[in-house]
């Protein structure tokens, strides 16, 4: 039978779980404080039981002698000039000073131990994440398009960072994604085993933002086979490849180069139109396109007569333009696609 813990351990280095960042100075300070606390505890214990120790000088143990003995004992130097002679002192050395010695050494070699235990900690996080992750979003490719998609998910869509998984082969891109608190998977998303590690079979959505159209087709095919119910959105550079993505299982396809070219052409004669489109597509401030449920007081009315600027009505999963006769009257369960004004307060929520 396959050991799940062992399987998760093998995924360390492929999956990278986000963890709180600690500055080097803070990490070093913690270790120094821990070592000093262990040393002070040993000094206190030795000084409290100083009558059970023998010094070669024969004049008993002073506080300085206790510091000296604790230091050479915890560092395992052990000159032997001060030794426990009573049964009580020897018992304390076995039960208390020896564990403190081990703790002292652990703190001193904390960097090495941290590297050795990192794989175990990551394996535990991976096991915990894989057992609970459901309805997350898998983003394939963390280039310009992938980063923008993630920023929109985290900002405008209010998706939690640990519910976004980035798949890429570029380690620098994965490092940038990890810095945002995202879960990352190193590997090619054209392989089913890599997508399986990302949990695509349990994802609610997959964003395909690769740099090549042929890769986008293959990723979409693989993702659709593994996740029949997931909502797949893909980006392509050329419009002629849209039908390939649709046939491969993409629910929506965005043509990046053609859209950018159209905006460039419009900018030569109607630059303000491009400014407005950019404003609508940028959720940070100004205007933004949003979707909301209709209110009970709006049912039965016309979407063209609402205070909001309504662009369309989503009914039974189908988008109708606001001037379509099918949506002359708003029905219960409809959702409105409208233009809203974004304020800095909205971004802080």
Image: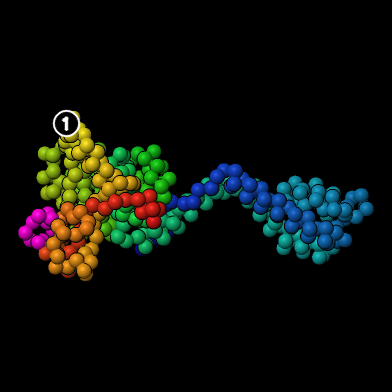
Q: How is the image coloured?
A: rainbow
Q: Residue at x 18, y 55 (%)?
A: 310
Q: 128 or 285: nearer the eye?
A: 285
Asked if residue 275 can be seen in this view, the reply is yes
Identify which residue is drawn at 32% across, 43% down: 147
Location of residue 163 with respect to 258 vertically, above or below = below
x, y percent for residue 235: 21, 43
Q: Quadrant of residue 41?
A: bottom right
Q: For the N terminus, give its image quadrant.
A: bottom left
Q: How many marks?
A: 1
Label 1 secondary element: helix
Quadrant showing the C terminus: bottom left
Q: Nearer the viewer, residue 312 or 79?
A: 312
How far across and how far down the image is residue 118, in percent?
Answer: 50, 50
Residue topped by disc 1: 269
Task: Judge whether residue 216 can be spotted in this image.
Answer: no
Q: Provide residue 110's location: percent of width, then percent of height.
A: 60, 48
Say if the magenta span includes residue 277: no
Compared across the picture, whether 163 is left or right of 260 comes to right
Q: Residue extending furthest left? A: 325
Label 1 environment density (alpha carbons within 10 Å; few <14, some 14–19, many ≥20): few
Residue placed at 77% from the left, 52% from the top?
Answer: 70
Measuring 17% from the left and 50% from the top, which residue is drawn there? 252
Q: Is residue 321 magenta?
A: yes
Range shown magenta: 318-328
Q: Nearer the viewer, residue 282 or 237?
A: 282
Residue 217 falls left or right of residue 47? left
Q: Position of residue 142 (x, y in %)?
A: 32, 42
């Amino acid at each position: 039978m396959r050991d799940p813990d062992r399987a998760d351990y093998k995924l360390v280095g492929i999956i990278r779980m986000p963890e709180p960042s600690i500055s080097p100075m803070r990490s070093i300070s913690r270790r120094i404080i821990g070592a000093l606390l262990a040393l002070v505890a040993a000094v206190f214990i030795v000084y409290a039981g100083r009558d059970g120790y023998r010094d070669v000088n024969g004049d008993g143990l002073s506080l300085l002698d206790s510091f000296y003995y604790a230091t050479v004992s915890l560092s395992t130097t052990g000159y032997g000039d001060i030794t426990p002679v009573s049964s009580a002192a020897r018992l304390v050395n076995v039960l208390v000073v020896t564990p403190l010695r081990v703790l002292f050494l652990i703190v001193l070699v904390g960097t090495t131990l941290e590297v050795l235990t990192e794989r175990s900690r990551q394996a535990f996080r991976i096991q915990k994440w894989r057992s609970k992750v459901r309805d997350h979003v898998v983003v394939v490719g963390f280039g310009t398009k992938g980063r923008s998609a993630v920023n929109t998910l985290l900002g405008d869509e209010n998706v939690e960072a640990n519910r976004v998984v980035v798949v890429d082969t570029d380690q620098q891109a994965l490092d940038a994604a990890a810095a945002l608190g995202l879960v990352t998977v190193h590997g090619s998303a054209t392989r089913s085993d890599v997508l399986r590690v990302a949990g695509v079979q349990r994802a609610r959505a997959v964003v395909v933002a690769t740099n090549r159209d042929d890769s986008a087709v293959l990723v979409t095919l693989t993702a659709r086979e593994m996740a029949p119910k997931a909502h797949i959105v893909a980006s392509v550079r050329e419009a002629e490849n849209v039908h390939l993505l649709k046939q491969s299982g993409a629910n929506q396809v965005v043509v990046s180069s053609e859209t950018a070219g159209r905006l460039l052409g419009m900018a030569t004669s109607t630059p303000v139109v491009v400014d407005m489109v950019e404003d609508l597509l940028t959720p940070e401030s100004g205007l933004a396109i949003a979707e909301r449920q209709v209110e009970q007081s709006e049912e039965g009315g016309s979407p063209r007569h609402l205070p909001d600027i309504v662009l369309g009505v989503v009914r039974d999963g189908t988008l109708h333009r606001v001037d379509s006769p099918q949506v002359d009257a708003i029905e219960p369960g409809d959702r409105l696609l409208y233009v809203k004004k974004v304020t800095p307060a909205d971004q802080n929520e």
